[in-house]
Image (cartoon, rainbow, N blue to C red):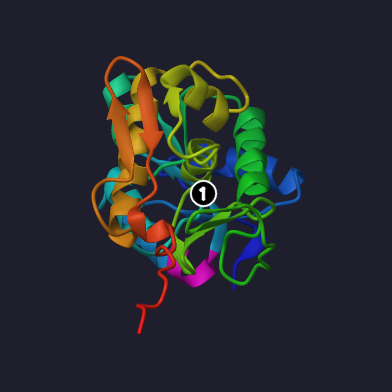
Protein backbone atom coordinates (compact mmCIF):
# COMPACT_ATOMS: atom_id res chain seq x y z
CA UNK A 1 0.00 0.00 0.00
CA UNK A 2 1.23 3.48 -0.84
CA UNK A 3 2.60 5.55 2.05
CA UNK A 4 1.86 9.23 1.41
CA UNK A 5 5.12 10.20 3.19
CA UNK A 6 7.47 7.89 1.27
CA UNK A 7 9.51 9.46 -1.53
CA UNK A 8 11.92 7.56 -3.77
CA UNK A 9 15.06 9.57 -4.59
CA UNK A 10 16.81 8.24 -7.69
CA UNK A 11 20.17 10.00 -7.86
CA UNK A 12 23.66 8.60 -8.54
CA UNK A 13 25.56 11.44 -6.83
CA UNK A 14 26.04 10.46 -3.18
CA UNK A 15 26.25 13.96 -1.74
CA UNK A 16 23.29 15.28 -3.68
CA UNK A 17 21.15 12.25 -2.76
CA UNK A 18 22.06 12.72 0.91
CA UNK A 19 21.24 16.45 0.75
CA UNK A 20 17.84 15.82 -0.81
CA UNK A 21 17.08 13.17 1.80
CA UNK A 22 18.00 15.55 4.63
CA UNK A 23 15.59 18.20 3.33
CA UNK A 24 12.83 15.65 2.73
CA UNK A 25 13.16 14.24 6.26
CA UNK A 26 13.07 17.77 7.70
CA UNK A 27 9.77 18.26 5.82
CA UNK A 28 8.29 15.09 7.30
CA UNK A 29 8.84 12.68 4.40
CA UNK A 30 10.49 9.25 4.43
CA UNK A 31 13.02 9.15 1.59
CA UNK A 32 14.39 5.98 0.04
CA UNK A 33 17.42 6.11 -2.27
CA UNK A 34 18.33 4.25 -5.47
CA UNK A 35 21.54 5.08 -7.33
CA UNK A 36 21.03 3.47 -10.73
CA UNK A 37 18.18 2.63 -13.09
CA UNK A 38 17.67 -1.08 -12.26
CA UNK A 39 17.87 -0.34 -8.52
CA UNK A 40 15.26 2.39 -8.98
CA UNK A 41 12.77 -0.05 -10.51
CA UNK A 42 13.40 -2.61 -7.77
CA UNK A 43 12.98 0.04 -5.06
CA UNK A 44 9.81 1.36 -6.69
CA UNK A 45 8.26 -2.12 -6.68
CA UNK A 46 9.33 -2.83 -3.09
CA UNK A 47 8.67 0.54 -1.44
CA UNK A 48 5.47 1.74 -3.21
CA UNK A 49 6.45 5.42 -2.86
CA UNK A 50 3.94 8.25 -3.15
CA UNK A 51 6.33 10.28 -5.34
CA UNK A 52 9.57 9.79 -7.27
CA UNK A 53 12.49 12.22 -7.68
CA UNK A 54 14.19 10.94 -10.81
CA UNK A 55 17.58 11.99 -12.15
CA UNK A 56 17.84 11.78 -15.93
CA UNK A 57 21.48 10.64 -16.16
CA UNK A 58 21.69 7.27 -14.43
CA UNK A 59 23.97 4.25 -14.86
CA UNK A 60 22.47 0.98 -15.99
CA UNK A 61 19.19 2.46 -17.21
CA UNK A 62 18.64 6.18 -17.77
CA UNK A 63 15.85 8.24 -16.24
CA UNK A 64 13.82 8.27 -19.45
CA UNK A 65 13.62 4.46 -19.47
CA UNK A 66 12.93 4.31 -15.72
CA UNK A 67 10.07 6.80 -16.12
CA UNK A 68 8.68 4.85 -19.07
CA UNK A 69 8.74 1.59 -17.07
CA UNK A 70 7.04 3.18 -14.06
CA UNK A 71 4.36 4.68 -16.28
CA UNK A 72 3.43 1.25 -17.66
CA UNK A 73 1.60 0.44 -14.42
CA UNK A 74 1.53 3.54 -12.22
CA UNK A 75 0.41 7.17 -12.23
CA UNK A 76 2.63 8.06 -9.25
CA UNK A 77 3.87 11.69 -9.42
CA UNK A 78 7.37 11.91 -10.97
CA UNK A 79 9.63 14.96 -10.66
CA UNK A 80 12.59 14.78 -13.04
CA UNK A 81 15.88 16.28 -11.86
CA UNK A 82 18.62 16.77 -14.43
CA UNK A 83 21.60 18.78 -15.56
CA UNK A 84 20.17 18.89 -19.10
CA UNK A 85 18.62 22.31 -19.71
CA UNK A 86 17.68 21.86 -23.38
CA UNK A 87 13.96 22.22 -24.10
CA UNK A 88 13.92 18.98 -26.08
CA UNK A 89 14.96 17.02 -22.97
CA UNK A 90 12.18 18.60 -20.95
CA UNK A 91 9.67 17.82 -23.70
CA UNK A 92 10.79 14.18 -23.88
CA UNK A 93 10.45 13.86 -20.12
CA UNK A 94 6.94 15.30 -20.17
CA UNK A 95 5.89 13.19 -23.14
CA UNK A 96 6.75 9.93 -21.41
CA UNK A 97 4.80 10.91 -18.30
CA UNK A 98 6.88 13.05 -15.93
CA UNK A 99 4.73 15.51 -13.97
CA UNK A 100 7.35 18.19 -13.39
CA UNK A 101 10.94 19.03 -14.29
CA UNK A 102 13.80 20.81 -12.50
CA UNK A 103 17.21 21.60 -13.97
CA UNK A 104 20.43 21.56 -11.93
CA UNK A 105 21.57 23.50 -10.05
CA UNK A 106 18.37 23.71 -8.03
CA UNK A 107 17.44 24.59 -4.48
CA UNK A 108 16.62 21.58 -2.26
CA UNK A 109 13.88 23.73 -0.75
CA UNK A 110 12.30 24.13 -4.18
CA UNK A 111 12.50 20.36 -4.71
CA UNK A 112 10.61 19.81 -1.46
CA UNK A 113 8.05 22.46 -2.44
CA UNK A 114 7.51 20.75 -5.81
CA UNK A 115 7.11 17.36 -4.11
CA UNK A 116 4.59 18.81 -1.68
CA UNK A 117 2.60 20.35 -4.54
CA UNK A 118 2.62 17.10 -6.56
CA UNK A 119 1.47 15.07 -3.57
CA UNK A 120 -1.24 17.57 -2.70
CA UNK A 121 -2.60 17.38 -6.25
CA UNK A 122 -2.45 13.58 -6.38
CA UNK A 123 -3.79 12.91 -2.86
CA UNK A 124 -6.27 10.07 -3.06
CA UNK A 125 -5.34 9.17 -6.64
CA UNK A 126 -3.06 6.25 -5.72
CA UNK A 127 -4.18 2.69 -4.86
CA UNK A 128 -5.37 2.28 -1.30
CA UNK A 129 -6.60 5.86 -0.95
CA UNK A 130 -10.28 6.70 -0.70
CA UNK A 131 -12.18 8.13 -3.62
CA UNK A 132 -14.69 10.97 -3.39
CA UNK A 133 -17.39 11.34 -6.06
CA UNK A 134 -17.05 14.50 -8.10
CA UNK A 135 -17.94 16.07 -11.42
CA UNK A 136 -19.94 13.99 -13.89
CA UNK A 137 -19.93 15.07 -17.54
CA UNK A 138 -21.10 12.78 -20.31
CA UNK A 139 -19.50 9.43 -19.59
CA UNK A 140 -16.77 10.97 -17.41
CA UNK A 141 -16.66 11.01 -13.62
CA UNK A 142 -14.02 13.19 -11.97
CA UNK A 143 -13.02 13.13 -8.31
CA UNK A 144 -12.01 16.68 -7.44
CA UNK A 145 -10.57 15.81 -4.01
CA UNK A 146 -8.48 12.89 -5.22
CA UNK A 147 -7.86 14.07 -8.79
CA UNK A 148 -8.96 10.76 -10.28
CA UNK A 149 -11.00 10.19 -13.41
CA UNK A 150 -13.17 7.41 -14.86
CA UNK A 151 -14.83 6.81 -18.20
CA UNK A 152 -18.06 4.83 -17.70
CA UNK A 153 -16.63 3.32 -14.52
CA UNK A 154 -13.23 2.48 -16.03
CA UNK A 155 -10.36 4.21 -14.24
CA UNK A 156 -8.16 6.45 -16.39
CA UNK A 157 -4.47 6.33 -15.32
CA UNK A 158 -3.85 10.08 -15.47
CA UNK A 159 -1.02 12.09 -13.99
CA UNK A 160 -1.97 15.20 -11.96
CA UNK A 161 -1.31 17.48 -14.94
CA UNK A 162 -3.34 15.25 -17.29
CA UNK A 163 -6.19 15.25 -14.77
CA UNK A 164 -6.23 19.05 -14.63
CA UNK A 165 -6.08 19.19 -18.40
CA UNK A 166 -9.08 16.88 -18.75
CA UNK A 167 -10.95 18.80 -16.04
CA UNK A 168 -10.45 22.01 -18.00
CA UNK A 169 -11.43 20.55 -21.38
CA UNK A 170 -14.67 19.27 -19.84
CA UNK A 171 -15.82 22.79 -18.85
CA UNK A 172 -17.74 22.44 -21.05
CA UNK A 173 -17.06 19.76 -23.69
CA UNK A 174 -16.93 21.22 -27.19
CA UNK A 175 -15.42 24.55 -26.10
CA UNK A 176 -12.12 25.52 -27.71
CA UNK A 177 -9.37 26.37 -25.21
CA UNK A 178 -6.25 28.26 -26.21
CA UNK A 179 -2.82 26.98 -25.23
CA UNK A 180 -2.45 29.93 -22.86
CA UNK A 181 -5.67 28.99 -21.06
CA UNK A 182 -4.55 25.39 -20.76
CA UNK A 183 -1.13 26.46 -19.46
CA UNK A 184 -2.83 28.50 -16.72
CA UNK A 185 -4.96 25.48 -15.82
CA UNK A 186 -2.24 22.83 -15.64
CA UNK A 187 0.54 24.91 -14.07
CA UNK A 188 -1.15 26.71 -11.21
CA UNK A 189 2.10 28.26 -9.96
CA UNK A 190 2.41 30.24 -13.24
CA UNK A 191 5.94 29.02 -13.98
CA UNK A 192 7.48 29.83 -17.35
CA UNK A 193 6.44 26.82 -19.42
CA UNK A 194 6.40 26.71 -23.21
CA UNK A 195 3.42 26.00 -25.44
CA UNK A 196 5.14 22.80 -26.52
CA UNK A 197 4.68 21.47 -22.99
CA UNK A 198 0.91 21.79 -23.46
CA UNK A 199 1.15 19.90 -26.74
CA UNK A 200 3.06 17.10 -24.98
CA UNK A 201 0.48 16.78 -22.21
CA UNK A 202 -2.38 16.82 -24.74
CA UNK A 203 -0.61 14.09 -26.71
CA UNK A 204 -0.33 11.93 -23.57
CA UNK A 205 -3.95 12.55 -22.54
CA UNK A 206 -5.21 11.87 -26.05
CA UNK A 207 -3.37 8.54 -26.13
CA UNK A 208 -4.88 7.46 -22.80
CA UNK A 209 -8.37 8.48 -23.84
CA UNK A 210 -7.98 6.58 -27.12
CA UNK A 211 -7.33 3.42 -25.12
CA UNK A 212 -10.66 3.74 -23.26
CA UNK A 213 -13.12 5.76 -25.34
CA UNK A 214 -14.86 4.47 -28.46
CA UNK A 215 -14.72 6.22 -31.81
CA UNK A 216 -12.27 8.84 -33.15
CA UNK A 217 -9.91 11.03 -31.12
CA UNK A 218 -11.77 12.80 -28.32
CA UNK A 219 -9.37 15.77 -28.32
CA UNK A 220 -9.45 17.79 -31.53
CA UNK A 221 -6.75 20.26 -32.54
CA UNK A 222 -8.14 23.62 -33.67
CA UNK A 223 -5.59 25.16 -36.00
CA UNK A 224 -4.15 28.43 -34.75
CA UNK A 225 -6.20 28.37 -31.54
CA UNK A 226 -5.81 25.34 -29.30
CA UNK A 227 -7.76 22.22 -28.39
CA UNK A 228 -11.34 21.02 -27.96
CA UNK A 229 -12.72 17.87 -26.32
CA UNK A 230 -15.59 16.22 -28.19
CA UNK A 231 -17.63 13.67 -26.30
CA UNK A 232 -18.08 10.40 -28.21
CA UNK A 233 -21.57 9.30 -29.21
CA UNK A 234 -21.41 6.64 -26.49
CA UNK A 235 -21.57 9.44 -23.91
CA UNK A 236 -25.20 10.08 -24.77
CA UNK A 237 -28.13 7.73 -24.20
CA UNK A 238 -29.97 6.50 -27.29
CA UNK A 239 -33.12 8.47 -28.13
CA UNK A 240 -36.39 7.16 -26.81
CA UNK A 241 -38.59 5.60 -29.45
CA UNK A 242 -42.31 5.14 -29.35
CA UNK A 243 -43.63 1.60 -29.75
CA UNK A 244 -44.87 0.77 -33.23
CA UNK A 245 -48.64 1.04 -33.59
CA UNK A 246 -50.58 -2.21 -33.73
Res 215 quadrant in image: bottom left
Magenta extent: 43-48
Image side of residue 114 versus residue 218, left or right:
right
Label 1 belongs to which residue?
77
Q: Quadrant of the N terminus?
A: bottom right
Q: How many marks?
A: 1
Which of the two residues, 26 or 1, is positioned nearer the viewer here?
Answer: 1
Whole-percent x, y for residue 60 in the image: 25, 52
Image side of residue 153 versus residue 210, left or right:
right
Which of the two residues, 73 or 235, is positioned nearer the viewer here?
Answer: 235
What residue do we see at 42% from left, 72% from top? 242
Dot 1 surroundings within 10 Å: few (below 14), some, or many (20 or more)?
Answer: many
* Residue 46 in view in this figure: yes
Q: Which element type, helix, strand or loop, lies under badge 1?
A: loop
Which of the two residues, 215 or 5, is positioned nearer the viewer here?
Answer: 215
Res 118 quadrant in image: top right
Q: Residue furthest front?
A: 246
Image side of residue 223 versus residue 124, left or right:
left
Which of the two residues, 189 or 215, is positioned nearer the viewer here?
Answer: 215
Amino acid sequence: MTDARRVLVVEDEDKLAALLCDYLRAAGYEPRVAMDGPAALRAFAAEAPAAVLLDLNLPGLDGIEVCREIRRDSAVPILMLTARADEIDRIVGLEIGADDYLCKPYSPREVVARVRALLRRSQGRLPGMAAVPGLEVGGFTLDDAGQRAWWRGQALPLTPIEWRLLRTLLQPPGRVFSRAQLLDAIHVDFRDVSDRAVDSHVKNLRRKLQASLPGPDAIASVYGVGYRLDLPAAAFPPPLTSPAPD
